[in-house]
Image (cartoon, grey):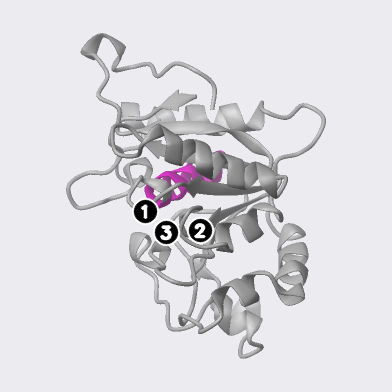
Amino acid sequence: MASMPRLTNEKGTLVTMANPKSTSSESYRKLRTNIQFSSIDSQIQTIMIASALSGEGKTTTIGNLAVTYAQEGKKVLLMDTDLRKPTVHRMFNVPNHVGLTSVLSSQYKVTEVLRETGVEGLHVLSSGPIPPNPSEMIGSRKMTALLQDLKEEYDVILFDTPPVLAVTDALIISSLCDGVILVVSAGKVKKDLVKKAKAHLEHVNARILGAVLNNVQLPKSRSSYYGGNA
């Protein structure tokens, strides 16, 4: 388990973009490395970042992780599959009047809604307009086919999702991914809820690669190192 400090500044800027040489940015690079080494026999190409509840730092984690993959030279896609309360478009300051739901409803081609982020190699596919049937869209054959096409174009695809215990959407996405990272906010979420979220993921045979303990206050003596595996 990797321990992470608070990873955005007061305005919520992505620290890996704003200050790539910072200790916090190094923590994200360590997380990226741990994910890469979590599987020897198979490639980890599609990754979901999950949390039991909202407000645990899931979106911040996935945004910064996406940036570190791109900084490594990978071609990266960050997909916002939270079709209920999307936030990725705000993080990267891109429009959201069209996006994933526009593609799944056959209104646009995916190439027409992909957004550049200002980070070379990193594209965002925002959620698009909030639909009346999020779970059905996420679980559709069209979504599966879209993902297969995108896997041909990108080295790494990251998914932001709703909290695991809120709705079924995250569990559906987890079944499409090579691995899941569970983000836990230190001191905020009770242990039994984390265990429940983990059990839900395991029930659908999600491959849990590890966990990130977020917002940990570490001693100054450890300020340059965050121990443990992802």
When the figure is inspected, residue 70 is found, relative to residue 105, above or below; the finding is above
The quadrant the C terminus occupies is top right
Dot 1 corresponds to which residue? 54
Give the distance between the C-alpha atoms of the residues marked 2 and 1, in whole angstroms: 10 Å
Q: Earlier in the sequence, mark 3 or mark 2?
A: 3
Q: Of helix, strand and loop, which one carries label 2?
A: loop
Q: What stretch of residues is rendered in magenta?
A: 59-73
Q: Secondary structure at mark 1?
A: loop
* Residue drawn at the location 65% of the way across and 31% of the way down: 36
Can you tell which mark lies on residue 118? 3
Q: Which mark is residue 161?
A: 2
Q: Residues within 10 Å of mark 2 (few under 14, many from 20)?
A: many
Residue 69 among those drawn in magenta: yes
Is disc 1 surrounded by few (<14), some (14 to 19) or many (20+) residues within 10 Å? some
Which amino acid type corresponds to the residue marked 2 in the rendered image? Thr
Kindly identify the residue that appears in the image at 39 percent across and 76 percent down. Answer: 95
